[in-house]
Image (cartoon, rainbow, N blue to C red):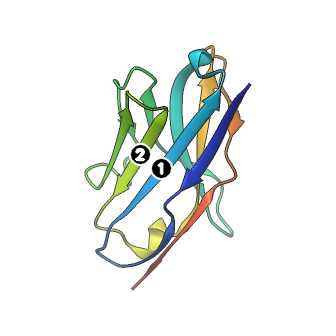
Amino acid sequence: QVQLVESGGGSAQAGGSVRLSCAASGRTSSIYTIGWFRSAPGKEREFVSSINWNGRNEVYANVVKGRFTISRDNAKNWVYLQMTDLNPEDTGRYYCAADTYGTGYDSWGRGTQVTVSS
């Protein structure tokens, strides 16, 4: 079992930056990939970014490519999502999720809210 806790959300102005953190605990040896997802009222949950647990193979949704950067602290069980050049469409609740044993995202955090105002 993997537990995930997100932090770092808050409010930002358009064009600003926010860094989200995801702390993993438990059976972290089972993690293949950590992904970030977001949801907003009236919208389906969407994929934002992912990174392999070894810190390689970053993947980004087209809408955030070039603005968001995912990274992993190999000394700690933390994954970060640096978000820059934010716009109001980035508003939402951001979740990190773990794909364990390559079977799909089966562990989820409770999320952290990001609100971007124009």
* Mark-to-mark CA distance, 1 and 2: 5 Å
- Give SS at disc 2: strand
Write down the residue under mark 2.
80
Compared with residue 105, is residue 115 higher up or lower down, i.e. above or below?
below
The x, y position of residue 66, in whole percent, is 25, 51
Could you tell me which residue is drawn at 44 percent across and 75 percent down? 88
The x, y position of residue 91, in whole percent, is 51, 70
Could you tell me which residue is drawn at 68 percent across and 69 percent down? 41
The x, y position of residue 32, in whole percent, is 53, 19
In terms of image quadrants, where is residue 29? top right
Write down the residue under mark 1.
21
In which quadrant of the rendered image does the N terminus lie? top right
In terms of image quadrants, where is residue 63? bottom left
Q: Are marks 1 and 2 in contact (CB under 8 Å)?
A: yes
Name the residue type under label 2: Tyr
107 left or right of 96?
Answer: right
Name the residue type under label 1: Ser
Q: Earlier in the sequence, mark 1 or mark 2?
A: 1
Q: Residue furthest bottom?
A: 118
Front-lying residue, 53 or 23: 23
Q: Residue furthest right?
A: 1
In which quadrant of the rendered image does the C terminus lie? bottom left
Compared with residue 87, is residue 39 higher up or lower down, i.e. above or below?
above
Could you tell me which residue is drawn at 34 percent across and 78 percent down? 14
Sort mark 2 into few (<14), some (14-19) or many (20+) by Cα contacts within 10 Å. many
Sort mark 1 into few (<14), some (14-19) or many (20+) by Cα contacts within 10 Å. many
